Amino acid sequence: MSKPRLKISAYLSAAFKVAIFCAMVSGVGAAHAFANEGIDFSIRFFDRRIYHVADDPINIQVTITNNSPFTYRFKLADDRMFSVDFEVRTVTNRLLEPADELVRRRSQSRQVFFREVAVEPGESFSFVENLRDYIRLDTPGSFIVRAFVHPELYRPEFLTANVRSDQRATALWAPQERPLTGVLASGRLNLNIRPPVVAGPDGLPRAMDVATGAILVRERLPPDEVVEYTIRARQRSQWERFFLYLNLEEMVARNPARQREWQRESQEGRQRMVEQLRQELRRPATTEAISLIPTDFTIERTQHTNNEGTVTVLKRFSGPHFTEIKRYTYYLQRRDNVWSIVDISVINLGAE
């Protein structure tokens, strides 16, 4: 009678082991689900504006918010391409191809350095990525953008040796190919890319108003109205209007810190310097005086000849405990009967 009991006991032991294994497997899946429970992942345009088929950045702010009662930890690679993915599709659901730089970096065999980020309950963690670093955006149209974060870093282990070389570039990136276990997925973001900007009669590209979509044309305004238009555009964060009357090339060439480099650079290098200044003026933490937002301002005096002029403006900047007062002098030039700002100087007048 003991032998049957031994057999039954052996069967029960084997069944118990299978049950334990299944519980462990389901537990791993549950752990992944639990780890992301209460974690909100969202994306938005960092500096929304009108985007064109060009190399101007499309900055996306990635935000991870912890709405759970526990600390959320994830790995953030120094090279963000091993932590973040973007997926861009047309309105007909066609997947756009990855940027060449993304494929190149992920194809290399190298060590990926990272740091562990801890997001406490009720806190958020954000960073900004240029969508053009991830996706090839060389045609105009309407698109749908999604983002993905890999808490344990991007790992292409799912690629096998029998993947053909002509499929490898796609497999290194394509969202539908990657294992989504534990990966955070964002909602959808609508992106519109317009055709290349049309050049105006003076050869300069015409800007477009974000609110109306209309082409902004520089009008024959007097110097004081040009300055007022520029200041008010900055107060309202209307970037296309803010840059409309700024001659960035002259501003770079007249800057003592950039003057020598400007003189040495080629035409391509000068264009790069102008774009760097444009991006610096748009940064939230910029120290460029012309981009600082005053609480209020008063135009004190305007002087001009046929082709050169100055406008003096008294500006007030509100702080937590005092109001700072500064006197700005705008220097303007007239070309083709249109005044533009080419330089500024600032005098600090103290506080009140």
Image (cartoon, rainbow, N blue to C red):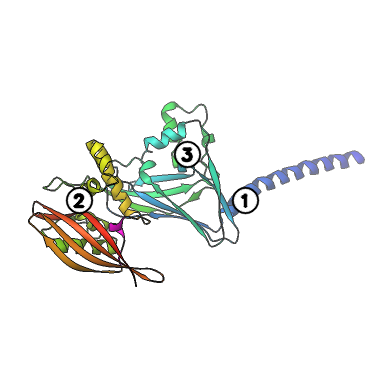
Looking at the rendered structure, the secondary structure element under dot 1 is helix
Q: Which mark is residue 31?
A: 1
Q: Looking at the picture, tell me which residue is in the foreground, 44 or 139.
A: 44
In the displayed structure image, the side of residue 344 where residue 102 appears, left or right:
right
Q: Earlier in the sequence, mark 2 or mark 3?
A: 3
Residue 169 percent across, percent down from the top left: 42, 32
In the displayed structure image, the side of residue 322 where residue 177 appears, left or right:
right
Can you see residue 252?
A: yes
Q: In this rendering, which labeled residue sits more in front, label 2 or label 3?
A: 2
Q: CA distance from mark 1 to mark 3?
A: 23 Å
Instruction: Determine which quarter of the picture holds residue 69.
Output: bottom right
Looking at the rendered structure, the secondary structure element under dot 3 is helix
Residue range corresponding to the magenta coloring: 288-294
Q: CA distance from mark 2 to mark 3?
A: 47 Å
Can you see residue 95?
A: no
Question: Label 2: few (<14), some or many (≥20) within 10 Å?
Answer: some
Which amino acid, mark 3?
A: Glu
- Disc 3: which residue: 177
Residue 194 percent across, percent down from the top left: 25, 48
**Which residue appears at 19% of the width and 61% of the height?**
227
In the displayed structure image, the side of residue 26 where residue 202 appears, left or right:
left
Question: Label 3: few (<14), some or many (≥20) within 10 Å?
Answer: few
Looking at the rendered structure, the secondary structure element under dot 2 is loop
Which amino acid, mark 2?
A: Asn
Q: In this rendering, which labeled residue sits more in front, label 2 or label 1?
A: 2
In the displayed structure image, the side of residue 84 where residue 208 appears, left or right:
left
Question: Label 1: few (<14), some or many (≥20) within 10 Å?
Answer: few
Identify whether 208 is placed above or below 312. above
- Disc 2: which residue: 247
Residue 130 percent across, percent down from the top left: 38, 46
Q: How many marks?
A: 3
